Amino acid sequence: MSTQKVAVITGASQGIGAGLVDAYRKLGYAVVATSRGIASSGDPDVLTVQGDITDPATAERVIAAGVERFGRIDTLVNNAGIFVAKPFTDYTQDDYAAVTGVNLAGFFRVTQLAVEQMLTQGGGHLVNVTTSLVDHADSRVPSVLASLTKGGLQSATKSLAIEYATRGIRANAVSPGTIKTPMHAEETHEVLAGLQPVGRMGEQSDIVDAVIYLENAPFVTGEILHVDGGVSAGH
């Protein structure tokens, strides 16, 4: 088995996901990067896999390709996520299918397969990216579908941490506030900054740095690390 560690990152083509690919490469990891439209990489230690993570077949391809190319899977960062803010009664069946598809189905199968591989190696690390709206709902940002899905992910993080605590697999989550990513149009930034207790939006690097902290923290598991400018503390 290769000694170079390997990280799988979902939602890896832009924003926080692309930042995570770079950060894990700087740590010396090989990376399996997946998203629907991801372009191939010139870096031999970055394997890109195109596919819709809501489809279990994509999860199977991603993990199989990583093991085939690099021989192991050490970390999985479930970064792919979508956010639809609508009044509760305005959500459509399509909204429900899209959000639960990416945020829940997109987490479930790839995590199962990663854990199976990690168990054969004697350990690994799972990181889920959630949202601080789970802990601190805001009447100005209606977010039931985010809370339903990312709240489930937050609880699952703790369950995974405890289920695998004696088998070398850690599970943690990073819970962002509102971050400057391609998800938020430039013209919305001023309004979004005003929703944060610190009066500004977070940077993508804030979330990347939090994931890397957790990566390098062997005694930390079951942690929900809030990187949210104070949103989860109160308002």
Image (tube, rainbow, N blue to C red):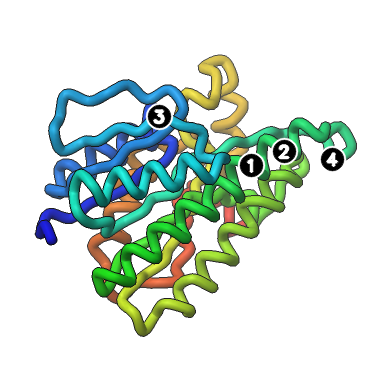
- Spatial distance from mark 3 to mark 1, Cα to Cα? 17 Å
| Callout 4 secondary element | helix
Q: Which mark is residue 97?
A: 2
- Spatial distance from mark 1 to mark 2, Cα to Cα? 6 Å
The kind of residue tagged 3 is Gln
Q: Mark 1 or mark 4, which has the lower sequence index?
A: 4
- Spatial distance from mark 4 to mark 2, Cα to Cα? 15 Å
The kind of residue tagged 4 is Phe
Q: Which mark is residue 101?
A: 1
Q: Is residue 91 visible?
A: yes
Tell me residue 213's x, y (percent).
28, 57
| Callout 3 secondary element | strand
Nearer to us of marks 3 and 4 is 3
- Circle 1/circle 2 CB separation < 8 Å: yes
The kind of residue tagged 2 is Ala
- For label 3, the residue is 50
- For label 4, the residue is 88
